[in-house]
Image (tube, grey):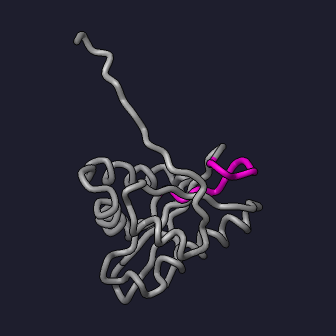
């Protein structure tokens, strides 16, 4: 079952975010707490429920620009995760369809997302639900320290 998140889901949302973006548990806790305390309208968060357990989530936000898109603002998937045991069962697709329906109802004509270049599973999942690859980017950094 796919539905929008409610406050009693917060601890599960933190757990799922930590699985997607490890190493930032305190940030996930603070961001999810702020989401409910301030009753933020974005991101729109959908969760996948299997029995009495949340097995996935999708965070839909809106950006001024996304590569390859012609409209602005653009509905943008900021985070999309399904637990490994629930993958391959249509859960990820159902989350995407809920986000697409929400974006369509809000008047958007396209939806965008991204994935790390090395995330072969994430890229394959996007392609499997109808996304097309637009570009690949390698980012660089150089310290401007005293050396």
Residue 57 colored magenta?
A: no
Residue 77 colored magenta?
A: yes
Q: Give the percent coordinates (x, y) of residue 34.
A: 41, 49
Give the left or right position of residue 126, taking residue 10 as reference.
Answer: right
Of residues 49 and 113, the one nearer the viewer is: 113
- Give, as a single range, the part of the protein colored magenta: 66-78
At a point 75% along the width and 51% down the height, the residue shown is 71
- Number of numbered discs: 0
Q: Give the percent coordinates (x, y) of residue 38.
A: 49, 49
At a point 64% along the width and 57% down the height, the residue shown is 75
Q: Give the percent coordinates (x, y) of residue 147.
A: 22, 12
Of residues 90 and 25, the one nearer the viewer is: 90
Residue 107, quarter of picture: bottom right
Give the left or right position of residue 125, taking residue 145 as reference.
Answer: right
Give the left or right position of residue 142, taking residue 91 as reference.
Answer: left
Of residues 122 and 95, the one nearer the viewer is: 122
Q: Give the percent coordinates (x, y) of residue 90.
A: 48, 85
At a point 56% along the width and 54% down the height, the residue shown is 42
The relative height of residue 70 versus residue 81 in the rendered view (above or below) is above
The relative height of residue 104 versus residue 37 in the rendered view (above or below) is below
At a point 37% along the width and 89% down the height, the residue shown is 51
Secondary structure mostly seen in magenta is: loop
């Amino acid at each position: 079952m796919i539905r929008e998140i409610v406050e009693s889901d917060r601890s599960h949302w933190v757990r799922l975010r930590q699985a997607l973006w490890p190493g930032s548990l305190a940030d996930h806790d603070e961001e999810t707490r702020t989401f409910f305390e301030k009753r933020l309208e974005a991101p729109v968060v959908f969760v996948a429920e299997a029995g009495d357990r949340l097995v996935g989530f999708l965070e839909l936000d809106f950006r001024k620009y996304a590569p390859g898109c012609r409209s602005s603002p653009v509905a943008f998937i900021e985070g999309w995760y399904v637990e490994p045991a629930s993958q391959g069962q249509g859960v990820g697709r159902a989350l995407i369809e809920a986000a697409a329906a929400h974006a369509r109802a809000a008047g958007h004509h396209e939806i965008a997302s991204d994935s790390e270049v090395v995330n072969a599973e994430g890229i394959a999942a996007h392609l499997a639900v109808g996304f097309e690859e637009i570009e690949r980017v390698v980012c660089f950094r150089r310290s401007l320290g005293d050396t």
